[in-house]
Amino acid sequence: GAGVSQSPRYKVAKRGQDVALRCDPISGHVSLFWYQQALGQGPEFLTYFQNEAQLDKSGLPSDRFFAERPEGSVSTLKIQRTQQEDSAVYLCASSLAGSGPQGFGAGTRLSVL
Amino acid sequence: AQKVTQAQTEISVVEKEDVTLDCVYETRDTTYYLFWYKQPPSGELVFLIRRNSFDEQNEISGRYSWNFQKSTSSFNFTITASQVVDSAVYFCALKEIQGAQKLVFGQGTRLTINP
């Protein structure tokens, strides 16, 4: 597609519920990134894929967070047993290769009640 | 460790004024990229510029200009003759050229242009 597409745009979850956030990167982009943006803060890195390989997951805050990109295109970020502190906007970005500027999606706003 | 600091949390100016957004960074890497992104209310981060650490030439694009000074580790962004449509949150970011591919962002500056 023309840009990075994320769904859903908004998600409300009850504490303890599992959620799955989807990212459709720009067609042909090898690199895919997930970031977490808390209210009033800058985005913080979560994880990075090159094709289907997850090369860096150093930013995932706990083992409740899991990301996959099985066919090197669409990616899913899964959060198990959601907590209130998981409430944030989750941004997905993609780029052609390492040095290229990352194109961002509009994000999924997750609210955990 | 890498760090980006945007000391100005919020700036408010009247339309047509010039405004400068400050960005100071820390890195042990000798080669890196610096970026500016704009985040309008829709939430999508819009890429504005990428600067290579080898290139300290300032850049101008229309009403936008960027001043990169390696000696002071700063990469400031100036909007000339500001317009209401420039209202947004602006982020400065840093990325290694070798090694980790992630962007390290500052906390952002919320810019409001009043008519």
Image: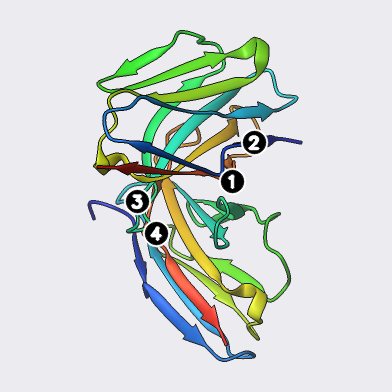
- Callouts 2 and 3 on one subunit: yes
Q: Please tell me whether residue B19 is drawn above or below residue A96 in the rendered image.
A: above
Residue at 43 percent of width and 63 percent of height: A71
Given the image, on which type of amino acid does mark 2 rest? Thr
Q: Which residue is mark 3?
A: B40
- Callouts 3 and 1 on one subunit: yes
Q: Please tell me whether residue A68 is drawn above or below residue B70 in the rendered image.
A: below
Q: CA distance from mark 4 to mark 3?
A: 27 Å
- Specify which label sits upstream in the sequence, 2 or 3: 2
Q: Quadrant of residue A96?
A: top left
Q: CA distance from mark 3 to mark 1?
A: 15 Å
Q: Quadrant of residue B48?
A: top left
- Callouts 1 and 2 on one subunit: yes
Q: CA distance from mark 2 to mark 3?
A: 20 Å
- Specify which label sits upstream in the sequence, 1 or 2: 2
Q: Give the secondary structure at mark 3.
A: loop
Q: Mark 4 or mark 1, which is nearer to you?
A: 1
Q: Which residue is mark 4?
A: A73
Given the image, on which type of amino acid does mark 1 rest? Gln
Residue B107, numbered circle: 1
Residue at 33 percent of width and 16 percent of height: B60
Q: Which residue is mark 2?
A: B5
